[in-house]
Image (spheres, grey):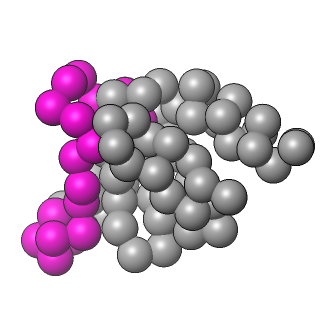
Amino acid sequence: MYLHLGSDVSVHTDDIVGIFDIEKVTVQKYMNEYLSVCQKHGKIYYVSLDMPKSIIVCTDIVYISNVSPLTLRKRLNSITAG
């Protein structure tokens, strides 16, 4: 199954490691360091140019999305429940 992250971007649900609220996790030093390393290696993909609301960590890439983490979790739950 695939989860729609916004715009024309969808990811396979098996590849998702975590969905995080960008405002809550970017204040953590470890997350900023992780995102810096990902940025240096070209592993960050911005889903939209709109205000980012969530970080979706996948096995090989990190997505920054303008869709709220709550909405993404609801979508994920509706996919996995069905």
Q: Is residue 22 visible to the viewer in this orientation of the structure?
A: no
Q: Residue at x 81, y 49 (%)?
A: 80
Q: Outermost residue, left direction? A: 40
Q: Outermost residue, right direction? A: 81
Between 60 and 13, which is closer to the camera in this rendering?
13
Q: Is residue 44 above or below residue 3?
A: below
Between 69 and 75, which is closer to the camera in this rendering?
75
Residue 40 in the image: state x and y as whole percent: 11, 71
On the picture, is 51 further left or further right than 24? left
Q: Residue at x 32, y 36 (%)?
A: 7
Q: Is residue 16 above or below residue 73?
A: below
Question: Where the N terminus falls, by quadrant?
Answer: bottom right
Residue 81 in the image: state x and y as whole percent: 88, 43
Q: How many marks?
A: 0
Between 46 and 28, which is closer to the camera in this rendering?
46
On the picture, is 14 further left or further right than 28? right
Q: Residue at x 57, y 63 (%)?
A: 12
Residue 10 in the image: state x and y as whole percent: 46, 51
Q: Is residue 71 above or below residue 32?
A: above
On the picture, is 40 further left or further right than 14? left
Q: Residue at x 65, y 68 (%)?
A: 14
Q: Quadrant for residue 43, please give it.
A: bottom left
Q: Is residue 52 visible to the viewer in this orientation of the structure?
A: yes
Residue 20 in the image: state x and y as whole percent: 50, 41
- Region rendered in magenta: 37-55
Q: Quadrant for residue 82, please give it.
A: top right
Q: Is residue 21 magenta?
A: no
